[in-house]
Image: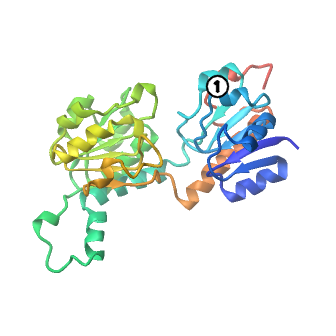
Amino acid sequence: MRKIIAYTRVSKPVIEDLKLQFDVSYFENYEYLESAKFRKALGEAEGIIGLELKVTKELLGLAPNLKIVSNVSVGYDNLDLPEMTKRKIMATNTPGVLTDTVADAVVGMLIASARRIPELDRFVKEGRWKEYLQLDRFGTDVHHKKIGIIGMGAIGQAVAKRCHYGFDMKILYYNRSRKPEVEDSYGAVFHNVEDLLKESDFVVLMIPGSRETKHFIKAEHFKKMKTSAIFVNASRGMNIDENALYNALKNNEILAAALDVFEKEPVGTDNPLLSLPNVITLPHLGAATIENELAMSRLAQKNLIRGLNNEIPPNLINQEVINDDDI
């Protein structure tokens, strides 16, 4: 049987299906080149499926038979695309499946932060609710506020839809190109980043992670925001300067933040952001629902099998690998 590698976050039903067709080497936890078992599997594998394995030039050099890497995620900053393309190895991802799930999580983070829900949950559980709440425990409204969305891709648009119809919010947005359909559907108004930051009550960052977007939001940007602003990052941890965010929160330059992603994941216990009561910190769970995990794994399975069968996968990232003579 043809050999493949599967690793973290491939749903069990998909693993079982793959075992019917392939010789599957499954790694439940992150393994890398220091593992002899992993290196041996790499030497024989034609396909890899899973979440966020660092596919580097060194790894690819140990995988002479590799034809495809199927990411169980929308993001693919873990892949060395130029090197994969040079070696004619297909790279795929799972867009579309998680759009509504992540948008739900973003709006949940926004509401939880504005209404201080995690903080007040602890307040009750710790037995500190002895009298009526004082003003210093109150949150802030979400409805009829201005939300600034940086990155109006599919998820950004799904967030805009929820905020427009659900909360009567005014939608401001920044994107590399304007989105007339979003402007028509949700009354969204295009702004440059600086003006968006100045005007928004909530700022949601939804851009992809890349070398170009590293620390896209830094100290100077937090200083432009309202002191009552709430910042939400559900994109990539690398897209913000975490030290700058910590200082902005500590110095009351902005009101609060909600983070689903960090520069280092899992986040270290020494990260100073974890010490602040006005920061919601989540373990990169934007797409993590039972239903969505299975849907993403199923799409990644389809990508993998198509590629291994010399067919064009539905979500091929590096189209340059396709030649008429090959597929």
Residue 301 placement, left or right of 23: left
Give the residue displayed 27% in from the left and 41% down from the top.
245
Taking the image as shown, residue 235 lies to the left or right of residue 3, namely left
> Mark 1 Cα within 10 Å, few/some/many (few <14, many 20+)?
some
Q: Is residue 202 above or below residue 211?
A: below
Q: Which residue is mark 1?
A: 57
Q: From the viewer's side, name the closer residue of 3 and 198.
A: 3
Q: How many marks?
A: 1
Residue at x-position 56% and y-position 35%? 78
Residue 156: x percent and y percent? 39, 42
Residue 151 in view here:
no
Q: Residue 298 in the image: x percent, y percent? A: 67, 50
Residue 2 picture quarter: top right
Q: Left or right: where does residue 307 sit relative to residue 291?
A: right
User: Which secondary structure lies at badge 1?
Assistant: helix
Which residue: 77% across, 20% down? 324
Image quadrant in which the N terminus is located:
top right
Residue drawn at point x = 42 percent, y = 49 percent: 268
Task: Give amino acid for label 1.
Answer: Lys
Image quadrant for the C terminus? top right
Q: Is residue 161 visible?
A: yes
